[in-house]
């Protein structure tokens, strides 16, 4: 690994508080000369600031009074926490797979319901972690900061939402609204020449892959790997290459995977197609490889009210809005498709 890529890997570990444990160790293992970075001359990192999250130039924050603006993308950055926690009128926990769509969605919702302007707070960390936060009473710690924001509504894959209704965390019914499929995200020049899922098992192809412990997408990816190359391919990507250090497991793939690709730390990673489209639309040096339909997996996105929501009427308004025509048009900008009951076998997150 080049020294600059190694420095960038350390930056992301510092900057994203949910970075995977062991990532630093795995990077050290890949660079036999890493200790030279700590001796001799220091070099300024050569990454353009725009490659670091949060990527949307403040648009994913509807707070009216932002006070002192202090963001250092490499190190001081709460990219997946949006808005003000001071007396919000609606708190949303949204699986991070469409963090980029939330800015236009919130803007449209506030146009229809102006009383909520500047009073919506939302989080976009992985759905499994959001469930843990609900169980923790809405309290979360990132870096040196701890705060509480109890959710009014939760959004994830339909299976996860149904399970959480059954367990009593959420109140039914589940409201499905869009679907999504998988793609292989790669750097713009695709240096590893990845053309399909089978290539992910090749020696020397470095991967950033969602961690099954935290990210529901990992289950769909494993199913797709089995469709493309059987259990041998799935085990190569998620077992053998994890052991040898050529697969890094992420905690928050929608931030880490594109960043690792742009830094040269990884050659490919499977994500949702919409995430790759957002990176391309943002002008980042990212592209994607389509996965054939017979190897792909479809997720159904859904939401429901959280039991004991402090703002139940606001939650109902958002749940009604999320499958309305204006909302669906916004989702379609990023490659999502409208959910139509009965059209899909339920293969959810």
Image: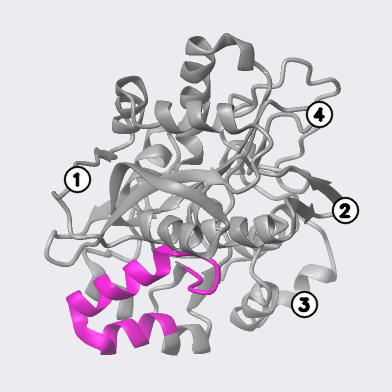
Identify residue for label 4: 86
Q: Is residue 39 or residue 48 the one in the foreground? A: 48
The majority secondary structure of the magenta stretch comes to helix
Q: Residue at x 87, y 53 (%)?
A: 144
- Camera-near label (1 vs 3) is 1
The region drawn magenta spans 210-238
Disc nearer the start of the sequence (3/2): 3
Compared to residue 1, the image places residue 102 above or below, namely above
**Residue 175: quarter of image:** top left
How many neighbours does mark 4 have within 10 angstroms: few (below 14), some (14-19), or many (20 or more)?
Answer: few
In the picture, measured across the screen, residue 344 lies left or right of residue 107, that is left
**The N terminus is located in which quarter?**
bottom right
Q: Residue at x 45, y 42 (%)?
A: 98
Identify residue for label 2: 144
**Residue 267: quarter of image:** bottom left
How many neighbours does mark 3 have within 10 angstroms: few (below 14), some (14-19), or many (20 or more)?
Answer: few
Q: Say whether marks 4 and 1 touch (CB < 8 Å).
A: no
**Residue 35: quarter of image:** bottom right
- Cα–Cα gap, marks 4 and 1: 38 Å
- Observer able to see residue 260: no
For the residue labelled by badge 1, is the local secondary structure a helix, a strand or a loop?
loop
- Cα–Cα gap, marks 3 and 4: 45 Å
Identify residue for label 3: 35
- Camera-near label (2 vs 4) is 4
Identify residue for label 1: 341
- Observer able to see residue 101: yes
Compared to residue 259, the image places residue 176 above or below, namely above
């Amino acid at each position: 690994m080049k020294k600059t890529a190694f420095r960038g890997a350390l930056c992301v570990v510092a900057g994203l508080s949910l970075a995977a444990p062991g990532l630093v160790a795995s990077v050290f293992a890949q660079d036999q000369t890493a200790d030279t970075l700590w001796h001799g001359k220091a070099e300024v990192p050569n990454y353009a600031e725009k490659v670091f999250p949060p990527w949307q130039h403040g648009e994913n924050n509807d707070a009216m009074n932002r006070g002192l603006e202090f963001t250092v993308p490499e190190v001081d950055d709460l990219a997946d926490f949006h808005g003000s926690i001071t007396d919000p009128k609606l708190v949303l926990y949204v699986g991070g797979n469409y963090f980029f769509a939330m800015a236009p969605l919130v803007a449209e919702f506030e146009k229809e319901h102006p009383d909520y302007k500047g009073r919506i707070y939302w989080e976009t960390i992985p759905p499994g972690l959001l469930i843990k936060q609900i169980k923790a009473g809405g309290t979360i710690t990132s870096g040196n900061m701890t705060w509480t924001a109890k959710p009014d509504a939760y959004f994830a894959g339909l299976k996860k939402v149904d399970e959480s209704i059954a367990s009593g965390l959420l109140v039914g019914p589940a409201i499905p609204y869009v679907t999504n499929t998988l793609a292989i995200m790669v750097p713009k020049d695709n240096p590893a020449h990845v053309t399909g899922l089978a290539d992910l098992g090749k020696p020397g192809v470095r991967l950033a892959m969602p961690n099954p412990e935290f990210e529901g997408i990992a289950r769909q990816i494993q199913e797709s790997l089995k469709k493309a190359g059987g259990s041998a391919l799935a085990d190569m990507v998620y077992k053998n290459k994890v052991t040898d250090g050529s697969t890094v497991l992420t905690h928050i793939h929608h931030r880490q995977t594109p960043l690792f690709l742009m830094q040269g730390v990884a050659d490919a990673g499977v994500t949702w197609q919409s995430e790759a489209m957002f990176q391309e639309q943002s002008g980042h040096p990212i592209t994607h490889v389509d996965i054939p339909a017979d190897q792909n997996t479809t997720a159904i996105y859904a939401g429901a009210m959280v039991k004991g929501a402090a703002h139940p009427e606001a939650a109902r308004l958002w749940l009604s809005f999320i499958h309305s025509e204006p909302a669906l048009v916004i989702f379609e900008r990023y490659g999502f498709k409208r959910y139509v009951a009965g059209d899909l076998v339920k293969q959810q997150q």
